Image (cartoon, rainbow, N blue to C red):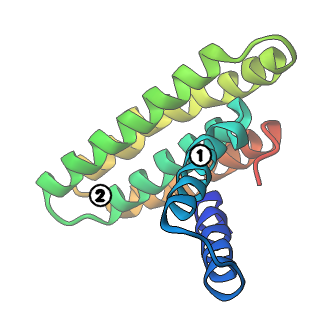
Amino acid sequence: MTKINKSKELIDKVILVWMKELSMTSGQSIAVTTMLGLGLACAPAAWASPKSDACAALVDARNALYSMINAKDRSAQDALNTKVQAASTKLDSVLAGMTEADAKLAADFKAVWDQFKETREKEIIAAIHRGDTGDAKKIADGIQLNRLSQMWRIMSCK
């Protein structure tokens, strides 16, 4: 269950309790709702960590790349490539910001990530652009999947 779904589920439960068991004035209800909203707005930031952000960006980059492999026309591929690059930039930024205890993880991850990006750009995206999606999938499901698994383990992604 994602963090957003957990938040929505919590909101639903709280609202259900309010509706069934609590009797509040309109002013009290507004105040409680405002406080709950502020708390939930801050919750995702509290749950986030550099490691989870790195994992999320890695998933985004991989998903966009797979969608790009399966896209039939060049404009769709270009739009998806923009998503791949944005996720990669996000991941690079997260890695650059990891300090202290996570610095070693970031360095280990980055060594594999740099190889992953180079293969993606020079081999997979090049294959997609020349219309050879079979070759792109073969690379993505081969060495890139191994690298993805290695990065996943380094960051203890869940």
Rendering coords of residue 156 (x, y %): 82, 44
Eye-nearest disc, 2 or 1 = 1
Rendering coords of residue 12 (x, y %): 60, 76
70 displayed left or right of 152: left
Q: Amino acid at mark 2?
A: Asp
Counting every numbered tag in the picture gives 2
Q: Is residue 125 visible?
A: yes
Residue 132, which numbered label? 2
Q: Is residue 139 visible?
A: no
Looking at the image, is 2 positioned above or below residue 65? below
Which residue appears at 56% of the width and 45% of the height? 38
Quarter of the figure with the C terminus: bottom right
Q: Nearer the viewer, residue 4 or 109?
A: 4
In three-dimensional space, the C-alpha distance between marks 2 and 1, rounded to whole angstroms, equals 28 Å
Which residue appears at 54% of the width and 41% of the height? 57
Furthest residue in direction top, as rendered: 100
Q: Nearer the viewer, residue 125 or 68?
A: 68
Residue at disc 1, secondary structure: helix
| N-terminal-most mark, 2 or 1 | 1
Q: Give the residue at mark 1.
A: 56
User: Quadrant of the rendered structure where residue 16 is?
Assistant: bottom right
Q: Amino acid at mark 1?
A: Ala
Quarter of the figure with the N terminus: bottom right
Residue at disc 2, secondary structure: loop
Furthest residue in direction bottom, as rendered: 20
